[in-house]
Image (tube, rainbow, N blue to C red):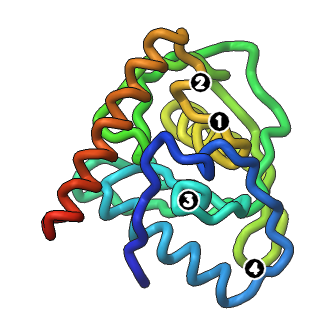
């Protein structure tokens, strides 16, 4: 398993639509392992392949946050929301590609998602609460959409400017031999 660098917004790869996965091989399993390790290390509760610069429809998530609770890592390949509740919920969302920025986003409270697992088997599951928010957030990444796209233009621009400044600072640090 390898920790991989997470792209920081703005990056054109974060706005691109990811391609469906057709090959269920060792490389895909290795990618899923790397994604989980990277997500846990960040730390985060979800990560989509485009956040690593890989334009494939793969996401990982684990919304178990309680200390000493058993992790529930999930790998979803080619996921699709097939049903969404009319009831909405609001969560304060953040994103590993938009570090330390949070905003309330309204989404369906319950969603039914269909995906393929690493063995190539079709799976369906209903998600609610934080799991529903997370899976929708990560599927958005696969479609080139970020949580800030739900915000008013002024707030979105303010966050984007902060990320541009962060990227400049990180680049300067790397040039000066710091990381």
Do the residues under discs 1 and 3 have CB atoms within 8 angstroms?
A: no
First along the sequence among labels 1 and 3: 3
- In percent of the image, x 54 and y 11: which residue is there? 153
Do the residues under discs 1 and 4 have CB atoms within 8 angstroms?
A: no
9 relative position to 164: left or right: right
Nearer to us: label 4 or label 3: 3
Residue 150 in the image, given as x and y percentages of width and height:
59, 19
Local SS, label 2: helix
Residue closer to the observer: 44 or 152: 152
82 relative position to 59: left or right: right
Q: Is residue 84 above or below residue 63?
A: above
Binning the other alpha carbons within 10 Å of mark 4 as few (below 14), some (14 to 19) or many (20 upward) gives few
First along the sequence among labels 2 and 3: 3
Q: Which residue is mark 4?
A: 119
Question: Any mark on residue 60, and which?
Answer: 3
Separation (CA) of disc 1 from disc 4: 28 Å
Q: Is residue 38 above or below residue 105?
A: below
Residue closer to the observer: 65 or 42: 42
Separation (CA) of disc 2 from disc 3: 21 Å
Nearer to us: label 1 or label 3: 1
Q: Quadrant of residue 144?
A: top right
Do the residues under discs 1 and 2 have CB atoms within 8 angstroms?
A: yes
- In percent of the image, x 57 and y 62: which residue is there? 53
Nearer to us: label 1 or label 4: 1
Local SS, label 4: loop
Question: Any mark on residue 145, and which?
Answer: 1
């Amino acid at each position: 398993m390898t920790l991989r660098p997470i792209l920081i917004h703005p990056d054109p790869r974060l706005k691109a639509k990811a391609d469906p996965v057709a090959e269920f091989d060792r490389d895909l399993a290795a990618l899923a392992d790397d994604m989980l390790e990277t997500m846990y290390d960040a730390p985060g509760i979800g990560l989509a392949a485009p956040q690593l610069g890989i334009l494939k429809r793969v996401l990982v998530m684990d919304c178990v946050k309680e200390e000493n609770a058993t992790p529930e890592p999930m790998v979803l390949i080619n996921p699709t929301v097939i049903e969404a509740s009319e009831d909405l919920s609001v969560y304060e969302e953040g994103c590993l590609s938009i570090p330390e920025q949070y905003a309330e986003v309204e989404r369906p409270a319950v969603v039914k998602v269909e995906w393929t697992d690493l063995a190539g088997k079709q799976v369906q599951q209903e998600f609610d609460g934080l799991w529903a928010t997370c899976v929708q957030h990560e599927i958005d990444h696969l479609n080139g959409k970020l949580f800030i796209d739900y915000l008013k233009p002024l707030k979105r621009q303010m966050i984007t400017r902060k990320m541009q400044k962060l990227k400049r600072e990180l680049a300067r640090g790397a040039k000066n031999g710091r990381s």
